[in-house]
Image (cartoon, helix red, strand yellow):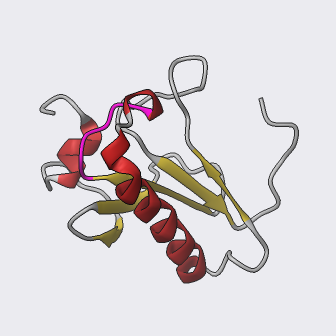
């Protein structure tokens, strides 16, 4: 997707602080973090949102969560806990229409959500 900022980051066209990169998944630090650790984890495949997931995407989505777990360990936030967020659509707070997980931690999270 030429107009997708996350596709452009994935292609190396835009700078980002990359913390993970393989053939299927890329992860980079959010430029406007809400906590000490705030990493965005994206599939390299362009999937606009949770609504557009296809049946064949299950292995890729599983990898997103495995990478999130591994990054939490790497960041040292796994023992205390962290939050994974996947926003979908305007009312869900989605800003960039490329499926992504927010890995947020390094401090106690606030409640209630929403």
Rendering quarter of residue 48:
top left
Q: Is residue 99 magenta?
A: no
Q: Where residue 70 sits: x, y (%)?
A: 51, 77
What quarter of the picture does the C terminus occupy?
top right
Q: Is residue 45 magenta?
A: yes
Which residue is pictured at 31% across the width and 37% down the height?
Answer: 47
Q: Is residue 9 left or right of residue 103?
A: left
Q: Is residue 61 left or right of residue 1?
A: right
Q: Is residue 63 left or right of residue 104?
A: left
**In the image, is residue 91 above or below residue 85?**
above
What quarter of the picture does the N terminus occupy?
top left
User: Which sits in the foreground, 62 or 23?
Assistant: 62
**In the image, is residue 5 above or below residue 82?**
above
Q: Where residue 96 sits: x, y (%)?
A: 39, 32
Which residue is pictured at 60% across the width and 17% down the height?
Answer: 91
State which region is magenta. 44-49
Q: Where residue 53 sits: x, y (%)?
A: 38, 36
- Total residue callouts: 0
Q: Where residue 83 sits: x, y (%)?
A: 69, 56
Check the image and name the residue furthest to the front: 55
Which residue is pictured at 14% across the width and 52% down the height?
Answer: 11
Q: Is residue 79 left or right of residue 76?
A: right
Which residue is pictured at 34% across the width and 48% down the height?
Answer: 57
**In the image, is residue 50 above or below residue 45?**
above
Check the image and name the residue furthest to the top: 91
Q: Main secondary structure of the magenta part?
A: loop
């Amino acid at each position: 997707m030429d107009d997708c900022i996350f596709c452009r980051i994935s292609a190396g066209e835009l700078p980002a602080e990359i913390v993970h990169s393989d053939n299927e998944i890329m992860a980079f630090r959010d430029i406007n973090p809400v906590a000490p650790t705030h990493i965005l984890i994206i599939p390299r495949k362009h999937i606009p949102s949770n609504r557009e997931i296809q049946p064949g995407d299950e292995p890729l989505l599983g990898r997103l969560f495995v990478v999130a777990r591994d990054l939490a360990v790497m960041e040292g936030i796994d023992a205390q806990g962290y939050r994974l967020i996947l926003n979908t659509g305007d009312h869900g707070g989605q800003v960039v229409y490329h499926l992504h997980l927010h890995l947020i931690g390094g401090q106690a999270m606030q409640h209630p959500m929403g």
